[in-house]
């Protein structure tokens, strides 16, 4: 599997990064995890506009899904004309309605469903193209799913947004790469069922025995170096901050 960080800024874009979006590729299949603010622009550095094969949306907060409205335009009015096969989109209950409302001016109530083939996420295991995936509900103010993606004996886990929970430990168990949010600062913000801090991400990585920890979703107003050092105090495997354009072979 190849993972490309498209955007990794938490809650709102930074001067240097779009919000959450990660491209996972194997066997020529391209799965995008989240499409937050600014991600559609960055995505074009890595793949063509029409080269995605499936999209997973962890939850419906704008910093994880709002560029789907722009991507609707791209696919509803395809460059060069014609009609595109609807693109599979895996998201929480209400994804189609959320995007239709956010777009505010779709040509019809059904237009979003004409370009995207919506699948409602539930906890469990299923296939997306060549990937075996497992999703679990995590802890966040809206329905949120974490995902484990496996291919060729390797595993990648993406936390989405969440507070600490057993389900995330299970998804991360033994993963080769753990892409984990660290929005909060240890000792400064402690709100249950909302976000993790760097130390919690590190503790989780240690418990799960992951091969590599990549911290992501750090808001621009937060000292990311502090969150990384907090994680490193409790996790002694390889760890680093996600940066736009970073590529990992898993
Ligand atoms: Zn977020
Ligand atoms: Zn969120």
Image: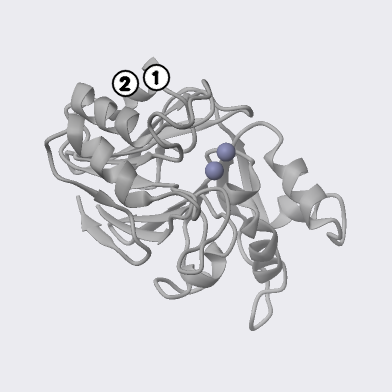
Residues at circles 1 and 2 in contact by the CB criterion of under 8 Å: yes
Percent across and percent down for residue 3 are 30, 55
Residue 8, above or below 78:
above
Q: Is residue 93 or residue 110 the one in the foreground?
A: 93
Residue 184, above or below 27:
above
Q: How is the image coloured?
A: one colour
Residue in the picture at 41% in, 18% down:
165
Q: Is mark 2 within 8 Å of ligand 2?
A: no
Name the disc covering residue 167, or none.
1
Q: Quadrant of ligand 1?
A: top right
| Residue marked by disc 2 | 170
Q: Residues within 10 Å of mark 2 (few under 14, many from 20)?
A: some
Residue in the picture at 24% in, 42% down:
229
Kindly state the secondary structure of the residue where label 2 is placed: helix
Percent across and percent down for residue 174 are 19, 29
Place residue 158 in its image quadrant.
top left
Residue 71, above or below 116:
below
* Left or right side of 162 for 59: right
Kindly state the secondary structure of the residue where label 1 is placed: helix
Percent across and percent down for residue 73 are 71, 68
């Amino acid at each position: 599997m190849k993972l490309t960080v498209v955007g990794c800024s938490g809650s709102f874009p930074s001067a240097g990064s779009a919000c959450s979006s990660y491209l996972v590729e194997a066997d020529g299949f391209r799965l995008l995890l989240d499409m937050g603010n600014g991600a559609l622009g960055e995505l074009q550095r890595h793949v063509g506009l029409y080269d995605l094969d499936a999209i997973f949306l962890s939850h419906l907060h704008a910093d994880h899904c709002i560029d789907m409205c722009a991507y609707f335009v791209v696919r509803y009015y395809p460059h060069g004309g014609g009609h595109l096969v609807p693109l599979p989109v895996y998201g929480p209950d209400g994804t189609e309605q959320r995007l239709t409302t956010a777009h505010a001016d779709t040509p019809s109530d059904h237009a979003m469903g004409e370009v995207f083939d919506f699948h409602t996420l539930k906890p469990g295991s299923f296939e997306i193209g060549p990937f075996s995936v497992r999703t679990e509900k995590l802890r966040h103010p809206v329905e949120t799913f974490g995902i484990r993606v496996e291919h060729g004996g390797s595993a990648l886990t993406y936390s989405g947004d969440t507070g600490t929970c057993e389900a995330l430990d299970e998804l991360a168990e033994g993963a080769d790469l753990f892409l984990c949010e660290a929005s909060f600062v240890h000792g400064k913000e402690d709100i249950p069922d909302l976000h993790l801090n760097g130390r919690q991400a590190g503790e989780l990585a240690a418990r799960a025995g992951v091969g590599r920890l990549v911290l992501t979703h750090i808001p621009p107003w937060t000292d990311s170096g502090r969150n990384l050092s907090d994680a490193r105090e409790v996790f002694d495997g390889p760890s680093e901050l996600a940066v736009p354009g970073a590529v990992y072979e898993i």
